Amino acid sequence: MNKKSFSTLSLTRRASLAALAISAAALATLSAPSSSYAEGKSIKVGIMSGEDEDVWRVVTNEAAKKGLKIETITFNDYTQPNEALENGEIDANAFQHKPYLDNQIKTHGYHIVPVGFTGVWPIGLYTKRYKSVAEIPDGAAIGLPNDPSNEGRALRVLQNAGLIKLKDGTGILATVADITDNPKKLTVKELDAGIVGRSIDDLDAAVINTDWALKSGLSPADRIAQEPIADNPYRNFIAVKEGNEDEEWVKTLVSSYQNDTVKAEFDKVYRGTGLSAY
């Protein structure tokens, strides 16, 4: 074999080996497990204590099938989960609606964004003393949640029920100062959202978030008015720190909640008082 033929053969062999290496690399890439399953990732998710713990046990099981390990961290009031998320103590939370988050961002400067809807719990007017709104007497004591977003929401329930009128153009963050007409001279008591339901025995009626109503032993039979469900701006969602919203583990987390298995548990736990919102 002359030198020219040997050189040509060597080049041919090198090209073949290079082609094989490229093919092997491509095959390895195609056969690698998808990162969308967040394989081996562990996260902490802040939720409210109570019924939602049952729902999140199912979410955790669904996530585990996709390689995502979830540890739920329970809270007892609405002010803590966003602070914990902002400070990096948890990786996500699931307890709030957009008006509440918007107010929290405005007040505290949080860098938190919603990434996937969970459920909606129509807020309602509850009472153990009366069968209808018409029976509520003059001078009745009515409890409301005192955080800005839920207070405005509660006042709209009272307005829709014909008990008060709010100033024209009042937005979703209405306060008692925006009441322009109170024909029954109701006494409005502003209380912490977690307390207003437990105070129902000391009140003629109270506008209570559905989750807190359930925790207080109230049922839909005790509800004499509620906000409309159509176009409801108060859908709850999973939230994460800004900058994490496109992470694969976030997509896995959301899909682990938004499925028929979790919906079945949600419906069982909330017995129709809450509705899936995705």
Image (spheres, helix red, strand yellow):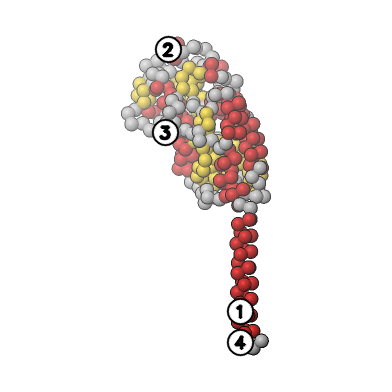
Identify the mark nearer the N-term, 1 or 3.
1
Residue 77, image x, y percentages: 58, 33
The residue positioned 52% from the left and 40% from the top of the image is 116
**Residue identified by numbered label 3:** 173
Q: How crowded is mark 4: few (under 14 residues within 10 Å), some or many (20 or more)?
A: few
Residue 21, image x, y percentages: 63, 68
Q: Is residue 91 visible?
A: yes
Q: How far apart are marks 1 and 4 (CA)?
A: 11 Å
Residue 24, image x, y percentages: 64, 64
Identify the mark nearer the N-term, 4 or 2.
4
Q: Is residue 142 visible?
A: no
**Residue identified by numbered label 4:** 4
Identify the mark nearer the N-term, 3 or 2.
2
Q: Is 134 displayed left or right of 265 in the figure?
A: left
Q: Are marks 4 and 2 in contact (CB under 8 Å)?
A: no
Identify the mark nearer the N-term, 2 or 1.
1
Q: Distance between the residues labelled 3 and 2?
A: 26 Å
Q: Nearer the viewer, mark 3 or mark 2?
A: 2
Q: Nearer the viewer, mark 1 or mark 3?
A: 1
The residue positioned 42% from the left and 12% from the top of the image is 134
Residue 38, image x, y percentages: 62, 49
Q: Distance between the residues labelled 4 and 3?
A: 86 Å
The residue positioned 49% from the left and 12% from the top of the image is 130
